[in-house]
Amino acid sequence: MAFFDWPQDRLISYLPEREEQPDFDDFWQATLDEAASHPLNATFTPWSGGLDTVDVFDVEFSGFHGQRVKAWLLLPRHRSGKLPGLVQYIGYGGGRGIPYERLAYSAAGYAHLVMDNRGQGGGGKTTADTHDREVSGTAPASPGYLTRGIDDPANHYYRRLITDAVRAVDALAAHPDVDSTRIGVVGGSQGGGLALAVGGLREDLRAVVADVPFLCHYRRASQVTDAGPYWEVARYLAGNRFEVENVIRTLSYFDGVNFASRATAPGWLSVGLMDKICPPSTVYAAFNHYAADKDLAVFPYNGHEGGGDYGLPRKLAALESSLR
Amino acid sequence: MAFFDWPQDRLISYLPEREEQPDFDDFWQATLDEAASHPLNATFTPWSGGLDTVDVFDVEFSGFHGQRVKAWLLLPRHRSGKLPGLVQYIGYGGGRGIPYERLAYSAAGYAHLVMDNRGQGGGGKTTADTHDREVSGTAPASPGYLTRGIDDPANHYYRRLITDAVRAVDALAAHPDVDSTRIGVVGGSQGGGLALAVGGLREDLRAVVADVPFLCHYRRASQVTDAGPYWEVARYLAGNRFEVENVIRTLSYFDGVNFASRATAPGWLSVGLMDKICPPSTVYAAFNHYAADKDLAVFPYNGHEGGGDYGLPRKLAALESSLR
Amino acid sequence: MAFFDWPQDRLISYLPEREEQPDFDDFWQATLDEAASHPLNATFTPWSGGLDTVDVFDVEFSGFHGQRVKAWLLLPRHRSGKLPGLVQYIGYGGGRGIPYERLAYSAAGYAHLVMDNRGQGGGGKTTADTHDREVSGTAPASPGYLTRGIDDPANHYYRRLITDAVRAVDALAAHPDVDSTRIGVVGGSQGGGLALAVGGLREDLRAVVADVPFLCHYRRASQVTDAGPYWEVARYLAGNRFEVENVIRTLSYFDGVNFASRATAPGWLSVGLMDKICPPSTVYAAFNHYAADKDLAVFPYNGHEGGGDYGLPRKLAALESSLR
Amino acid sequence: MAFFDWPQDRLISYLPEREEQPDFDDFWQATLDEAASHPLNATFTPWSGGLDTVDVFDVEFSGFHGQRVKAWLLLPRHRSGKLPGLVQYIGYGGGRGIPYERLAYSAAGYAHLVMDNRGQGGGGKTTADTHDREVSGTAPASPGYLTRGIDDPANHYYRRLITDAVRAVDALAAHPDVDSTRIGVVGGSQGGGLALAVGGLREDLRAVVADVPFLCHYRRASQVTDAGPYWEVARYLAGNRFEVENVIRTLSYFDGVNFASRATAPGWLSVGLMDKICPPSTVYAAFNHYAADKDLAVFPYNGHEGGGDYGLPRKLAALESSLR
Amino acid sequence: MAFFDWPQDRLISYLPEREEQPDFDDFWQATLDEAASHPLNATFTPWSGGLDTVDVFDVEFSGFHGQRVKAWLLLPRHRSGKLPGLVQYIGYGGGRGIPYERLAYSAAGYAHLVMDNRGQGGGGKTTADTHDREVSGTAPASPGYLTRGIDDPANHYYRRLITDAVRAVDALAAHPDVDSTRIGVVGGSQGGGLALAVGGLREDLRAVVADVPFLCHYRRASQVTDAGPYWEVARYLAGNRFEVENVIRTLSYFDGVNFASRATAPGWLSVGLMDKICPPSTVYAAFNHYAADKDLAVFPYNGHEGGGDYGLPRKLAALESSLR
Amino acid sequence: MAFFDWPQDRLISYLPEREEQPDFDDFWQATLDEAASHPLNATFTPWSGGLDTVDVFDVEFSGFHGQRVKAWLLLPRHRSGKLPGLVQYIGYGGGRGIPYERLAYSAAGYAHLVMDNRGQGGGGKTTADTHDREVSGTAPASPGYLTRGIDDPANHYYRRLITDAVRAVDALAAHPDVDSTRIGVVGGSQGGGLALAVGGLREDLRAVVADVPFLCHYRRASQVTDAGPYWEVARYLAGNRFEVENVIRTLSYFDGVNFASRATAPGWLSVGLMDKICPPSTVYAAFNHYAADKDLAVFPYNGHEGGGDYGLPRKLAALESSLR
């Protein structure tokens, strides 16, 4: 894709003013309180898929508005003592899929919970099993998830998904073999955006890993790329020409830049300088606002694949330092 | 696009066996009865957009489950006596838009109701103003509308939209200047599919105009084209490999081929032989099963635009013969 | 398309030096004088297309070199007194089409003349019925119309089309129900470019509406985009490498920037900041040089569709203020 | 492009019924008679381009309606006696270009005339220098040349270009160093179509070489491919929906299938089985109707490039056998 | 991609005549004998990547001509007794990559060897670490690997890679924890083609799993698709027009159809009916010629991803039945 | 392609710091010394292709490591005295092809040697006949030639090809009809890059013509374009994320910017400002570092075709001034 965003020297110092409403914290406090008013009721049902070295559980817990959310939990079969835990969030359009795809973290000794994406997972990649129930009906939206409920923060899809993501940490902590004081969140793309969000909304995490994070700096994102889901915002605004500022305002409640500024756990982010899905300037905006210890892995010739599995040794080392 | 489907001589005689469940009629009877149990409550609010020759009303009525649906009603300002009426349905991804776009039918002397598409209209074309409220939450679906609730006919999006479409005829008939014995339904693409559906579900219509209709013969459609919304089914099934027959079964409740076989009003259909969005074999399947008087306009060098406005004289003549 | 041109703050103040030959005014004076030497001979033949609220006339008048040009005239059927008038010009590759497509202006109370595009209209969109007769034969040209006769301003296609456009105002004024002192010109894309040209060549107009105008600032246009008809210039110059300055010189006689600098009527322009067909910098160049009262509607997330029908209320209000 | 047309065994025996009007021969007789009524007036002006082994002349002669047509003539500098001659026609969108590009035939000992394409040559490839003057004005046409004047055979562009091509043979024969009894015509794509046409209109040729010929079997061509200039017909008919048969009728006067059926000189044709520009079934249709001795070079894995320069040894051998 | 190949009923019975040279078996016997003349010298060096449940070894062994080939070996850390073994081959353009990506087979209890692809792995996906040393120098070839040495079976790239693949089974068997009587081969795409090849060249295997196999039925493959590596053959033959039969002859020595006809172990194959990379007719050709017990998983709406990880339960069950 | 690189005023003064290792000259001295240790053994075998005005020879000579390299030599048949000579290098992916394609230089009076490209020529354009034999085996590489051996300058493909190119001058000089004191090198794209390289490595040349040269300023090239062969570097580095600096270091030994800084013969370069294959900033970098007399032809509206044959008169005049 070549370099389509700013040159790297400009990216390094890019610290845009945050767009944030005064009731940002109140909005989230109220949302999470409502969710917490429902019993978590995390259930762990053994799943049999022919694997010998790992115990897999089909998980369900109560997320946004108490709606039931699915997940997988993978534990190394030969374990002793309480394990440190990782909650992983999944990319846009996918879901928790099938456990074979994500065996590395449990093989590395973690209790590994893979949260499903409500309503996503019908696009031909990994599948999902969780229904999405909206607060009110669906306002007209661009195909995809990013503009669902974009007329109002209370109705927006990511209010529900981020709340699920916050509660997923509780679900992992609810398993008896997990040490709830040593939990981190990880994810790439949308999963990275969710990790940043949870990192800004919970103070009990020990690590935040956000690879090529999505859900950051929507105003610029929707103007600088015509690829991937940010484009859904542009497409929506092409039809709804007079709602630009209201839409940007809604999205500000779900902006990783704002979550990053509230971070308390150490953060490991990554960016691909040729990433048209999550353009580098949007990642740098979040990174430069990240309020805790932080590190950024820069992949100059990569697009949205970022470091791929080749970035894993560095991530495992970082997690080791924080969680063991 | 060249000819990518079968040659025309094969199309002309293409009469595939219908795929239809035994409870097809019961399903629709129950669905429409439920809708009818809610008061229609059609309201007509004058809209002021600077037009001198036409009266425009912002309409609301109760559709599926009694949910409120929006529409426009356009009446020629200088009118006398009760007018024949037309209900128009809109294409995929759009909505009722803004009245300037659709002035021809009222200019030709009809009471013209343009029904909104619930939840659609965020894709940069015409906009919509109607919320979609699902029966249960959203099951995982491919972006778009065609796979929403594809796990079960009771949940499927088109159960709701087709019910709205049936009720829209009642809404038009509710206006005091409309002659409820002379109503036809018209539409292109998704609008054509809805016209076919309403034509199969109501016995009181006088005309069905379905240009390049969508929502027909899903099994073949999902295999013969990789363009447009039929492809959403293929994309969904790429991820959900073991649900093929269940998905085709769900879709059979919303298949224009099955509705066409129940038609009682005269039907005018059209087809573009280079149409990759609604491939000609799927249109011929519906046309050849159409059970009432019928006519097909064939545009050999056209794609999904079909006859465009150039097909209007023929349509107006047909409507004239039936409705005046 | 994302933002591919300059950022908006640079656009707002972009006022490039005009490229204009000293004989620009003489060239046009002579051209229009020649056209005026032929009798206008505007004829209005009733057209019957099944419309009840509007009178439609098939129009012919003498344009460039006295060649006959086609148009439609639409008048509200129920009218009294002389009507204000609008001449509309059509986009690149299309023609006057069929009257059903353009019913809004007459519905709003205007006498509405839609001028045909000579020689265009064979590209699958709206059709045309007017022949183009060149002064001398066709010099080699890039497919399309923009490079026809690009070797010499006297031979250039737009010399003929702009002259037709100037004469179309006379044709509208020639109808007995039209108030020739209250005429405006409107159009989008090529139609907007023609409106700007006529606005610079006539002093008797009351309004100029130019949506996403084409035919502006050719030097930059041919370098900043590889989409749409500006690219025909680049393609021509790719083959004719040593004619760059001569080509730019020819085009300067037909540049909306130069016409805008001669404007006397109030102008309403619009621009889509993601418009690759008519890039924003070329529109701002014309707008910033516009010499009369002016207003610019900016659509940040739109491409060449600009405001579409959603921009119409604002246009109707502007026209109302000037023409009623 | 893979095999997109019929399998080769079907191609080999493909002999579609010719579509030809009864006055085909009269039409051409009258056209050529009119051209012959103008003095040929072939002029040969030396061109100096730094070449030592070849004499190049800038040629002009009277073609259709006596309009002046340009060409290059290349003769080997060291020559003795009268030379056999070749007239070469150029592909769609190009022109005679610059002599450096086509040195092979004169190097092989032929007097080689390269005819220019009137009005073409502005598309960024080879350039042209010949104006095109139409009989009447340009009717609306699809961008390109194939639909210019498609409303009437008398106005059609190829009536003019084919007439030029017929007269170019006379122009070559007019040079004192050329043996007018030993002349062949050659060309690829549009040039091949012109060679077939001239081969059907003149009885004094000794060889016809038509590589991957264009201008053949328009009905199928316009339906089987969406690439290249045949698509201009489809695009025209997309807009002009009700003119299909009239357009096919016009084109029948310029169809290589009809010219091939009148061939008297031996013909060497070639076809690429993956050619989307000139699909194999259209070439086989012409070849199978070719009425004289003939040979077809089949390139199974080639597209429109066909044999390229690698086909030249076989062509030179064929020409040698006929012309020396 | 829609269905671009034959309909499924034709595919099911498609049994093309095999193209095979008389010395096919001699060619391979000599090739493998030469390789066997070099000591295997399999080395297993522990690799430390932070994994707790699996022992990973960096493997090297002697493949074609004794050249050193890399691989990974993964063993479940908690093991007892000799394990059944699987050799996995990797897709086109990739290499053995990094062990995190392929943890499922060892987690299921197998000794799992992942063979590297010599010379591949520079294309941005998984990486490789093995050099490719050609017998003689590289003949001109299309970019990619499929045409390297296509002038002669002795020089062809796949002679070397298939020999490596045969030897990789010996390398796995050489590990003391592996039961050499219970070994299977698995792979997808190129990996599936290699599995078929090894299955035809070794008689001591217990299972062959070939997902969406590449390297089958080259003649049809190169004609039916313009995607993926088969297209390299077509591209090569576009330039080397007169070598078609020689190229097909070379490739016949490496054709999965011929290997399948020699199969002795049970085979599990899979096919995506919308797979343009490895078209269904080429997979059916191999499957229908497969000479031992066999099963085919058909994914009608999938392309080259085939069953993905969702096909794994069925594969694990099949392997379980054969290897445990 | 529009202007995608910097504006021209920035290009004109773009003089990036060279990236060059201290042993650059030693590396090349050793490489060329090794090649020179093999006897050149240039052979000239007459080739018979039906041409009368030119003598063509099939040439072979010893290039890198003494490996045999093919070429064509074209001499005007009617010649007297020793001729000035030109060595031409060919573009990426092609080879020496067939002599008909390149007749201009011999027609202009030069002894013209066309060097083959080892291992290239299988991509469907011009073909090659020269094998490439690597020093050690092929390290994993991106498809194409630019990354072959990119792990080490000693293994890199262009070490071999540039050495061939240096030796090709000796091969031309070895023909008895050539004046070895009047030799120039010419080429476009890769051929231009080779001409620059040879111009930096030999002091006995009289002219260097490099059209739109490739092989320049790799760091920027791999970041600014995603078209053409520079992208192979980016693709390689996408997979091999941690080798960026080592790869740039390897390429520095083959960078036209470094060769240009050592130029001694007058240089004629050209650049297309819309060239995405060889972006203008990379050409200006080489031109601005060119150490001898120089001239740059700028084609503002051209892409990689640059001046094409239309640039030839200027080139012939330049060569005339230097070589005659």
Image: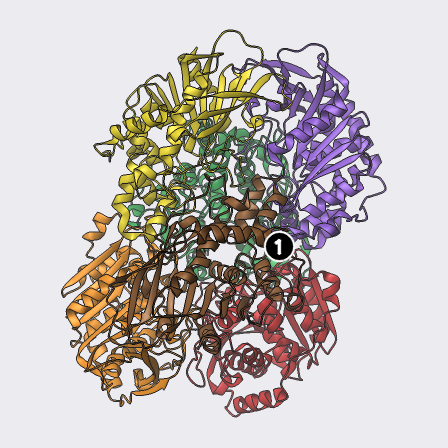
Chain colours: A green, B purple, C yellow, D brown, E red, F orange
Q: Position of residue C113 (x, y in %)?
A: 48, 22
- Secondary structure beneath dot 1 equals helix
Give the residue at x 19% y 70%: F207
Q: Residue furthest right?
A: B22
Q: Is residue D251 visible?
A: yes
Q: Which image quarter holds the N terminus of chain C?
A: top left
Q: Amino acid at mark 1?
A: Arg
In the displayed structure image, the side of residue D188 where residue F306 appears, left or right: left
In the displayed structure image, the side of residue F204 where residue A68 appears, left or right: right
Question: How packed is label 1: few (under 14 Cα within 10 Å), some, or many (20 or more)?
Answer: some
Q: Position of residue C273 (x, y in %)?
A: 39, 35
Which of E156 and C39 lies nearest the eye of the viewer?
C39
Q: Position of residue C278 (x, y in %)?
A: 39, 37
The residue where tag 1 is placed is D220
Vertical side of D39 occupied by B147: above or below: above
Which of C208 and C135 lies nearest the eye of the viewer?
C135
Give the residue at x 26% y 84%: F35
